[in-house]
């Protein structure tokens, strides 16, 4: 679960042919790091650092574009999804309008509270918006999965969860099966897996309430 992370910075480490012995001692969990060295014993490279806003996810495209997201939780908040432009800077993604939602507005075509970003094996970008600010319930049924074309930086399709998951749900993470064109998303507050046919848009929730998807209290 990623509900309560009281850190304003998170370490995300990507490993390329990395073994346990390749881990470097003395590193702290304050920076977003990239480890894709030409040699296993090369040092990690610092790619992005943010000590103010609370990020939860990271995605890297095949040509090296780096994205991260900031859910609307307690504490400072500015943008939901950004593309990293330098060590300390980023820009709203895909544009400022998608990051401009305010309470009372329509959130169907804006980020409300993004929890995860993911780029699949076909280099398609997916944004998971549980639309539950402060994890206090889905806002106006605006929870959604959004596909963005990384070539054009345009939104290709919005998959609305509607009533597949309850108002108290918090859609948490995603994995995509490119071969079958299905997506699988976790419902971390209620327990359950959302199965989305990315071709037809049909979706269902399975295992809701099953012990296999609920943490042991």
Image: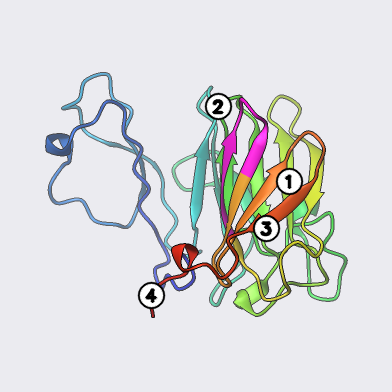
Question: How far apart are labels 3 and 2 at the CA level?
Answer: 24 Å
Q: Give the SS element for disc 4.
A: loop
Q: Is residue 44 shown above or below 212?
A: above
- Residues 35 and 174: in front is 174
Q: Residue at point 55% right, 77% down?
A: 74
Q: Where does label 3 land, which residue?
A: 205
Of labels 1 and 3, the one closer to you: 3
Q: Which mark is residue 216?
A: 4
Q: Earlier in the sequence, mark 1 or mark 2?
A: 2
Mark closest to the chain's N terminus, 3 or 2: 2
At x 62%, y 68%, the residue is: 72
Q: Nearer the viewer, mark 4 or mark 2?
A: 4
Residue denoted by label 1: 146
Task: Report the Cα–Cα distance between label 1 and label 3.
Answer: 18 Å
State the CA–CA distance, disc 4 to disc 1: 31 Å
Say whether marks 1 and 3 touch (CB < 8 Å): no
The residue where tag 2 is placed is 121
């Amino acid at each position: 679960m990623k509900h309560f992370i009281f850190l304003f910075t998170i370490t995300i480490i990507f490993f390329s042919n990395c073994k346990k012995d390749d881990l470097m001692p003395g590193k702290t969990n304050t920076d977003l790091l990239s480890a894709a060295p030409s040699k296993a014993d090369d040092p990690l490279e610092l790619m992005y650092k943010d000590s103010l806003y609370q990020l939860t996810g990271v995605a890297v495209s095949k040509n090296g574009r780096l994205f991260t997201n900031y859910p609307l939780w307690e504490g400072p908040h500015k943008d939901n999804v950004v593309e990293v432009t330098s060590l300390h800077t980023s820009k709203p993604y895909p544009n400022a309008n998608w990051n401009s939602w305010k309470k009372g507005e329509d959130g169907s075509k804006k980020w409300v509270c993004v929890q995860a970003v993911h780029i699949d094996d076909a280099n398609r970008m997916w944004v998971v918006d549980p639309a539950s600010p402060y994890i206090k319930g889905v806002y106006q049924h605006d929870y959604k999965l959004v596909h963005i074309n990384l070539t054009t930086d345009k939104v290709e399709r919005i998959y609305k969860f509607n009533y597949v998951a309850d108002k108290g749900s918090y859609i948490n993470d995603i994995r995509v099966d490119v071969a079958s064109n299905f997506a699988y998303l976790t419902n971390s507050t209620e327990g359950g897996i959302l199965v989305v046919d990315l071709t037809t848009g049909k979706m269902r929730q399975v295992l809701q309430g099953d012990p296999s998807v609920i943490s042991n209290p």
